Image: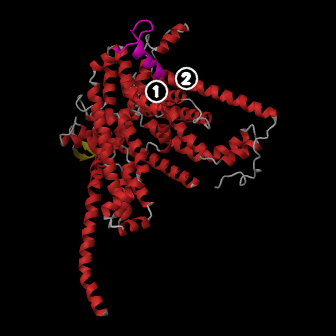
Amino acid sequence: MSTTATTLTAAAAPLRARRSLLAWCLRYALVLPPAAVVVIFVAWPLWVTLYHSFFQLDARGHAVAFAGSKNYQALFASPLFHQVLWNTAVYSVLAVVLCVSIAFGLSLLLYGRVAASSRALLVALFSPTVMPMIAAANIWLYFLIPQFGMVDQLLRWAGLGHENWLGHPGTALLVMVMLFVWKYAPYFALFLLAGLQAIPPDVWEALRTEDPYGWASFRRVILPILRPMLAFVTTMAVLYAVETVDPVFAMTQGGPNNGTNLVMFYLYNLGFNYYSWGPAAALSVLLMIGLSTLSGLSLIVLERRAFHWQ
Amino acid sequence: MAVNGMALGMRPGKPSTLPHHVASRRTWRARLRQAVLWFVACVWGFPTLWVLYETFFAGAGRFGFTFANLAQAWQVAPFGRYYLNTLVMVFGLLAVQLLFGAVVGFVLARYDFPLKSVITLIFLFQVVVPIYAVMIQDYRMLSSLHLLNTMAGVMLPYTVSGIAVLSFRQAFRSVPRELEEAARLDGYGTFGIFRRVYLPQAIPAALAFAVVSVTYHWTDFLWPMIVTNTDNARPVVVGLAMMAQASESGMQWNLLAAGTAIVILPVLILFTLATRRILAAFAATFNW
């Protein structure tokens, strides 16, 4: 009895091995083509970009000679790049600070009344959230047309003359900041609102009886609970601000006098208008490091938040 | 950190037996809050409303309503074609991403094979790397494949979404094995189990991913702008941007308003019809 059983299993072993080999092949056949797409369109280009950033490239973008860090040096030697960095820094800091604080205020205003609010209010508030950035930029462009636009008409009505808002570097950058705040503050408010709603009702009830006027308890209890969500929203806002390129295209093309030339627009220009592939590759590498660190960070923060509450 | 009233050293709350002055003060504050909220909503909604107003009422005389601006904008730029391109690209991408996501997610969640962790890492990598970092190389690759200025070219780098793969994997992993064994005893094959047991469990994840993917690709601008250079493959957002540039170099301003209205009206109508559902979807998911 037992001998037949062992011979049976012995006979089955190669069969099983062949079947498991077949199963492996099937699994690879399902998984490898999509993985290959990622490798071809993300990993390999990234490697080539990294490689090219250390090489001297000809006009057609082929590597001709090792250049060490010369591409990076050329990038940082350009005064235009300094201005671009400065613009991006000013824009990002202003946009993120304003956007996150307004979003926070909005989420506090909205807390507990989304269900009771009228549809008109919600549509008005969240209409910028659901439209593309290009459309939002066009709306503001239309709004700010010199002489003819709404803003100038109001100014004239108030007797304040007119102003070409997109014609001066400072005001043009401020318009970009306003556009960012207008577009994204309600969106980020939704996240903060979700954070507020995740606070258990007994906390609110306890705070209400303990401290009905509530500033101290807000600062001591609600803010610390919301901190992970605030951190997540802030990293996301930084990411969005640094990646801003659509409104630059639609509104100013980087002008006037490079006053709104932000880093993504500069990268686009380096690659597709100036054809200086080497510095473009160097800038891509730097952006890749910065942006993916940030988005990785936001994921970690979010994970911690999820861990926190579950 | 367990957050509840007791842990914070507070007394359990008694339900609303507040002194009269506190209660009246609270309704007063609630009214003020409501008023501020309405004010903010008016400020936020005003620019959009103004553009829509100008589109439908400008140049129509007093109290008139006109489609002339819309019709003129529609003639200046082929918005019908743009919309068709956008629909094909957005929903084509969504279908392909969901297909790859479900299949790869299933295999990764359910089976073991050599190098599985490396392959998972490849998909995670795709989530973290921004398209901007590889834009120039991808453009050159498309150029050598003669795919520039085609919808396939715009879609190719996005066809596999790491987010889709990872969220399907997560959803499939939470399916209990007992369910699968019961289905196998009932005579289902592997494909039947995938379709009848696993896929239904992943519907919420798939819907959440669909919202992210559709909003991202519908509003995406830089990449389609670089790849396309004629109206044949341009999505509506790129078409609108091109029209706006033309308007800055001396086109009529009312066309800019009308073109913008053409782009935002469908989504605004959709949003008005399903306001709360869409807001809930936005809050449940996020743009990576």
Say which amino acid is labelled 1: Met
Quarter of the picture containing the C terminus of chain A is bottom right
Badge nearest the viewer, 2 or 1: 2
Q: Which residue does the image show at 31% across and 25% down from the upper left?
A: B242
Q: Which residue does the image show at 27% across and 62% down from the upper left?
A: A28
Seen from the viewer's position, the closer of residues A101 and B174 is B174
Quarter of the picture containing the N terminus of chain A is bottom left
Disc 1 target residue: A176
Q: Position of residue A65 (x, y in %)?
A: 23, 46
Q: Which residue does the image show at 62% across and 36% down from the upper left?
A: A108
Position of residue A168 in the picture relative to residue B226 (left or right):
right
Q: Is residue B87 above or below residue A260?
A: below
Is disc 1 on the same chain as disc 2? no
Secondary structure at numbered mark 2: helix
**Colour mode of the rendering:** secondary structure
Q: Position of residue A303 (x, y in %)?
A: 51, 53
Q: Is residue B271 above or below residue A307?
A: above
Q: Mark 2 near mark 1, Cβ–Cβ under 8 Å?
A: no
Q: Please state the chain letter of the residue tagged with numbered disc 2 in the rendered image.
A: B
Disc 2 target residue: B42
Seen from the viewer's position, the closer of residues A73 and A268 is A268
Q: Please state the chain letter of the residue tagged with numbered disc 1 in the rendered image.
A: A
As measured in the structure, the alpha-carbon distance from the residue carrying label 2 to the one carrying label 1 is: 21 Å
Q: Position of residue B80 (x, y in %)?
A: 28, 26
Part of the protein shown in magenta: B47-67
Secondary structure at numbered mark 1: helix
Q: Position of residue B96 (x, y in %)?
A: 30, 47
Say which amino acid is labelled 2: Cys
Query: Tag 2: Cα neighbours inside 10 Å, few (<14), some, or many (≥20)?
Result: some
The disc at residue B259 is none
Query: Tag 1: Cα neighbours inside 10 Å, few (<14), some, or many (≥20)?
Result: many
Answer yes or no: is residue B37 visible: yes
